[in-house]
Image (cartoon, grey):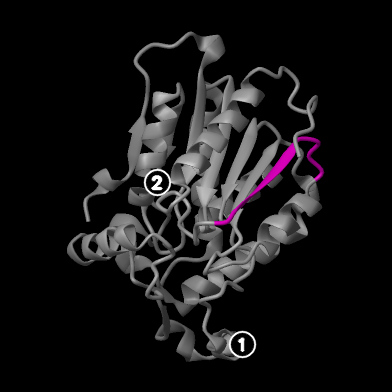
Amino acid sequence: MSESIDFERVHDSVDDESKKAVLLFHGLTGSPFEMKKYGDFLFKNGYDVFCYSFPGHGERISEIETVTWQDWCRFAQEKYDGLRNNYNKFYVSGLCLGAVMAIYLAEHNNDITGVAALSTTLFLDGFCIPWTISLLPFALSTIVKFYYTFPEDDCFGIKNERTRKSLAKLTAKADIGMDNYPLNCVDGLLKLSKNVRKNLKKVTCPVLCIHSKYDNLSSTKSAKVVLKGITSKTKQYVELNDSYHMVLYDNEKIFVMNTVKDFLSKLNTVENKKEAVCI
């Protein structure tokens, strides 16, 4: 896979005082490809946008069996450190694993302007998760974790049948992500999620959580745990009723993007990020 799947969208000239950016993170076994339309939308609305493949993902997908959740965290922090000082306002957003990582960064960096978390996956309890998930603790303690994979369910996280079929065809032709979840990768997500849950009170920046009532991978419990646990004064929860997990591609994708845009726009006009309460 070409490294061009990573992307950066940077405006040519912007007043330094109004410079703002969003660092995006993709989902588990996915790639920046799934964030491109979202990134283009944010760019058109005045934000510089950055999105890179997690270690073991994207062009390094052959290495997915060798990386750990700590590798993902170090990678995310390095990208954040390399970009943050160039901007007056800096936001972090992600989908699935990417949403969990966005919250992780907010726990460890108090200069994040705001977080937009989409389909946050702290728990694997969605309606398409197989019953075999109950055997996960046993499997992770054996060599099985290096060989077994959870297959992607038939819905591909998308309720819209036309979009689902198009994505299935594209996935078959292009190397844009995996059609299964390696067990050690799932283990990494769960360990990261456990770590994030323990430190939610450290999050003080504004947070928006968007989650579908019918998420096939992770129920709304994940988003609700986040909003209950953080100490942010500005927080918002939006529940979708006509989408599955991949909210950036499903029936409510335009609504999702506009909701993020409105949330960030409000923060752009607030000098003190703790002034407003938005629930």
Residue 248 relative to residue 142: left or right: left
To which residue does mark 2 refer? 35
Task: Assess whether residue 195 is covered by the magenta stretch.
Answer: no
> Residue 227: x, y in percent?
75, 50
Taking the image as shown, residue 38 lies to the left or right of residue 17, namely: left
Left or right, 153 with reference to 273: left
Q: Which residues are magenta?
A: 231-241
Secondary structure of the residue carrying tag 1 is helix
> Which residue reaches farthest top?
15
Residue positioned 36% across, 29% down in the render:
9
- Badge 2 marks a residue whose secondary structure is helix
Q: Does the magenta run of residues contain 238?
A: yes
Dot 2 or dot 1, earlier in sequence:
2
Q: Nearer the viewer, residue 259 or 140?
A: 259
* Amino acid type for the residue under numbered disc 2: Met
Residue drawn at the location 64% of the way across and 34% of the way down: 114
Q: Residue at x 46, y 25 (%)?
A: 47
Does residue 201 appear in the picture of this structure?
A: yes
In the picture as drawn, the residue positioned furthest to the left comes out as 173
Q: Residue at x 58, y 19 (%)?
A: 88
**Residue 15 location (% of width, % of height):** 48, 8
Any mark on residue 134, and which? 1
Q: Quadrant of residue 148?
A: bottom left
Pinpoint residue 30: horizontal percent, then vertical percent.
Answer: 39, 59
Check the image and report above or below for 85 versus 99. above
Q: CA distance from mark 2 to mark 1?
A: 31 Å
Dot 2: within a 10 Å radius of its alpha carbon, few (fewer than 14), some, or many (20 or more) residues? many
Q: Is residue 79 visible?
A: no
Q: Nearer the viewer, residue 12 or 133?
A: 133
Answer few, some or many: residues within 10 Å of disc 1's Cα (few below 14, many 20 plus, some between 14 and 19). few
